Amino acid sequence: MTVDQVAADVEQLTRKLMTEEQDRPISADDTFVDLGLDSLKLVDLLGAAEMHFDIEVPDEEVGNFVRVRDLTDFVLGAK
């Protein structure tokens, strides 16, 4: 997968869990909090990413996902 493909898929997964302004643009530098994802929704997002990309996110890594770019970079590194 290319960076653009992974970024688009991460955006789509994130958008499904956003609580407000679902039509707003999402950039790689947006934080998940700014997008309306609390800690529980972030865990849901990581679970969805694990299934979608067939990866595993170690529990100790969960706190490292602050920005959309963090998840995209993790997925690319896991592939």
Image (tube, rainbow, N blue to C red):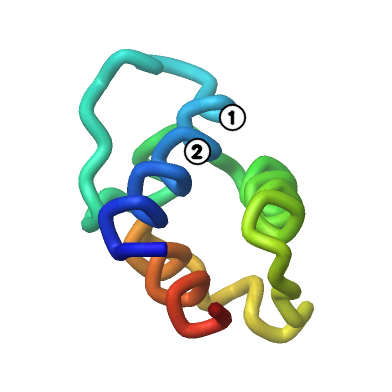
**Relative to residue 64, is residue 49 drawn left or right?**
right
Q: Quadrant of residue 26?
A: top left
Q: Residue 71 in the image: state x and y as whole percent.
A: 47, 65
Identify which residue, 11 or 40, lies in the foreground.
11
Is 48 rendered above or below residue 3?
A: above
Q: Residues within 10 Å of mark 2 (few under 14, many from 20)?
A: many
**Relative to residue 75, is residue 52 drawn left or right?**
right
Placement of the N terminus among the 4 image quadrants: bottom left
**Relative to residue 70, is residue 60 drawn left or right?**
right
Q: Quadrant of residue 78?
A: bottom right
Q: Residue 47 in the image: state x and y as whole percent.
A: 75, 53
Q: Residues within 10 Å of mark 1 (few under 14, many from 20)?
A: some
Q: Amino acid at mark 2?
A: Thr
Circle 1 sits in a helix, a strand or a loop, which is it? Answer: helix
Kindly identify which residue carries mark 1: 17
Q: Are marks 1 and 2 in contact (CB under 8 Å)?
A: yes
Residue depicted at x 70% and y 74% = 57
Placement of the C terminus among the 4 image quadrants: bottom right
Kindly identify which residue carries mark 2: 14
Residue depicted at x 49% and y 76% = 74
Q: Residue 61 in the image: state x and y as whole percent.
A: 64, 81
Q: Residue 29 in the image: state x and y as whole percent.
A: 22, 57
Is 20 rendered above or below residue 52?
A: above
Residue depicted at x 54% and y 38% = 13
Circle 2 sits in a helix, a strand or a loop, which is it? Answer: helix
Q: How many marks?
A: 2
Q: Amino acid at mark 1?
A: Leu
Residue depicted at x 70% and y 70% = 55
- Disc 1 to disc 2, C-alpha distance: 5 Å
Is 51 rendered above or below residue 12?
A: below
